[in-house]
Amino acid sequence: MPEGKHVNSWVTLILGTILFVLGVLTSASGGLTAGIIPLGIGLTLIYLGWRGGRIATLVFGHIAIALGCYMVTWGIYLLPHSDPTVAHIFGRPLFWGLFSIFGGICANYHGFCKCITKKA
């Protein structure tokens, strides 16, 4: 491939694509506000997989943790109004908040990984 047009991380690109699709499905199923944040995180992961570097990965990790904490708090607030169904588990912000927190922790660890630091 020409210079500047290579994929940095196929795994990140694929995970971002999956998260983007899940965000679209969540938004389409009626949880518009709960689907926007996973949609944005998926787009960011697609960018990081395509062109991202160490600093972008670390910034993304910290933002994902902060957004995840907000979503967990929001999800706990909505918990008394939720049903134990698959749609309410995946369509409410509690699940996506936990997903975002753990993804942010993973991104922060990955920012100090040898595969990233040797490229920077």
Image (cartoon, rainbow, N blue to C red):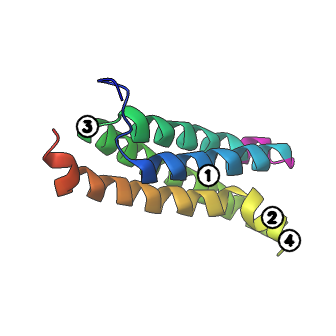
Amino acid, disc 3? Ile
Task: Say which mark, if any, is on residue 88.
Answer: 2
Q: What percent of the width, then of the height, locates residue 106?
A: 37, 60
* Mark 3 vs 1, N-terminal side: 1
Q: Is residue 112 visible?
A: no
Quadrant of the image for the N terminus? top left
Which residue in the protein does label 1 denote? 18
Query: Within 10 angstroms of label 1, few (less than 14), some, or many (20 or more) residues?
Result: some
Which residue in the protein does label 4 denote? 83
Q: Is residue 35 visible?
A: yes
- Mark 1 and mark 2: Cα distance apart in space: 19 Å
Query: Within 10 angstroms of label 3, few (less than 14), some, or many (20 or more) residues?
Result: some
Residue projecting furthest to the bottom:
84
SS under mark 1: helix
- The answer to whether 51 appears left or right of 95 in the picture is left
Q: What percent of the width, then of the height, locates residue 64?
A: 45, 48
Q: Check if mark 3's residue and mark 2's residue have beta carbons within 8 Å.
A: no
Q: Check if mark 1's residue and mark 4's residue have beta carbons within 8 Å.
A: no
Residue depth check, mark 1 versus mark 2: number of the one nearer the observer: 1
Amino acid, disc 2? His
Which residue does the image show at 86% across and 49% down from the upper left?
29
- Mark 1 and mark 4: Cα distance apart in space: 25 Å
Bounds of the magenta span?
A: 29-34
Residue depth check, mark 3 versus mark 4: number of the one nearer the observer: 3
Query: Within 10 angstroms of label 2, few (less than 14), some, or many (20 or more) residues?
Result: some
- Residue 33: quadrant of the picture: top right
Task: Say which mark, if any, is on residue 55.
Answer: 3
Placement of 3 over or under 116, stated as above or below: above
Placement of 38 over or under 89, stated as above or below: above
Amino acid, disc 4? Asp
- Residue 75: quadrant of the picture: bottom right
Residue projecting furthest to the front:
1
